[in-house]
Amino acid sequence: MALRMMKYAMPEQDPKVRAHNFDEVALGYDEETAIAEASRCLTCPNPRCIKGCPVQVDIPGFIAKMKTGDFAEAIKVIKKSNALPAVCGRVCPQEHQCEKYCVMGIKGEPVGIGRLERFAADYDLASENETKPIEYAADASKVAVVGSGPAGLSAAGELARRGYKVTIFEALHKAGGVLSYGIPEFRLPKEKVVQVEIKNLEKLGVKIALDTVVGKLYTIDELIDEEGFGAVFVATGAGLPSFMHIPGENLNGVYSANEFLTRCNLMKAYRFPTYQTPIKAGKVVAVVGGGNVAMDAARTSLRLGAEQVYIVYRRSEKELPARLEEIQHAKAEGIDFKLLVNPVEVIGDDSGNVKRLRCIKMQLGEPDASGRRRPVPIENSEFNIDVDTVIIAIGQGPNPLVQSTTPDMQTNKRGNIMADDSTGKTTKPGVFAGGDIVTGAATVILAMGAGKKAAEAIDKYLKNKKH
């Protein structure tokens, strides 16, 4: 039987239907398709895929179990390295990580590693296997984790399994960080996936203190000196929105993508009036930016009732930083891409509401520091787009609160915490950091990898401290 060169397609909701609901777009493989996709794996003697995984999942090991239909063992293999497999199977950019190195991708399509991870994780969630709590030693050290996003959750799970009493301090009323406030329900279901994964960590013995703002209620020094934590891992992410600083950004109907998505995802504005969170989606929406956050904001706008949604991006389609899958989904749902276009002003009416977006056409010049060709304005090419809502999705920066109350922890000029790449160690003894607060906005799995590395380093630090 000839080896199948193409991946088995992921079943999805019809674009015309899903554009009007918040149900998950990708429906997942069934058992037969999962086994068939796993059987495409060549079981390479020297597998390259693992090196592309920031948390070092034993990919050939779990796929070997999938081939035989032993899904219960497959998830055990994954969970040895990955604390959030149902999340990663949905939102990791596998095409730039593990699947990028798959030998099958040389002449065909790589094995659908992410799709198989999702299947195994969902199989496990459906089986409702009980997570057994850790039995802690009487003298177990306490570790504080600041932030419950992917870096914090990953570190907490790893530290708990190593026998540490972990408390996560979360500023918001629900745990999950960007998994809860940033990624829409149709990509990452909250109750079915995110909260279940978090509850499993709590069953291990991880404590989560919600509505607890470190930097206000406690400083880092107070956690160590007064609350008895032997080490602190700072994983506060990148939740501070960036703006373009163009005229009209203060008009009614201009949102940061951070605020727009938080209102919708965390505060459930899409379920108004059951949840009384105000949000104005508008009838004609322009989303400025080309990353995954921009795609999320555009697709959310559509589901909130917008009749026309534009993605306004200053480079060409080739340079779009969003995942190809997200771009394809957005196009299939009817979102209009205005490429090589950059806003210069938001224009309002007499009441201070957004009326139109003034833009200028761009052309690509020489490559900049990122390696992408720099967009250059074309003189006298300005034009208007009639809109009533503008969402700015051009990136996020670090919230400065923890850094400003911890003066002996060094930061760079952007306000990110300076930490060692391999250990997460900061300039303050006993304090480690990782994820977006160190790197700037990146991916869920890279943040998880940083959390895992930091947990290993914290373990060594506390063991050396005891001796």
Image (spheres, rainbow, N blue to C red):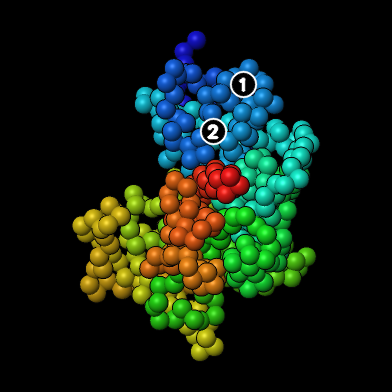
In the image shown, does 92 or 45 lie closer to the viewer? 45
Report the residue marked by disc 2. Answer: 57
Q: Answer with left or right where residue 347 lies relative to residue 382.
A: right
Task: Write the residue at 54% across / 72% down.
Answer: 405
Q: Residues within 10 Å of mark 1 (few under 14, many from 20)?
A: some
The span from disc 1 to disc 2 (Cα, nearest Å) is 14 Å
Tell me the amino acid under the disc marked 1. Lys
Q: Residues within 10 Å of mark 2 (few under 14, many from 20)?
A: many
In the image shown, does 43 or 452 lie closer to the viewer? 452
Task: Write the residue at 52% across / 86% down.
Answer: 352
Q: Is residue 434 above or below residue 384?
A: above
In the image shown, does 323 or 309 lie closer to the viewer? 323
Q: Answer with left or right where residue 120 lies relative to residue 257.
A: right
Task: Write the residue at 40% across / 77% down.
Answer: 245
Q: In this view, does 12 lie above or below 74?
A: below
Q: Where is residue 278 in the image (x, y as percent from the top left)?
A: 67, 73
Q: Please say whether residue 365 is visible from this viewpoint.
A: yes
Q: Where is residue 332 in the image (x, y as percent from the top left)?
A: 51, 48
Q: Where is residue 267 in the image (x, y as percent from the top left)?
A: 68, 65
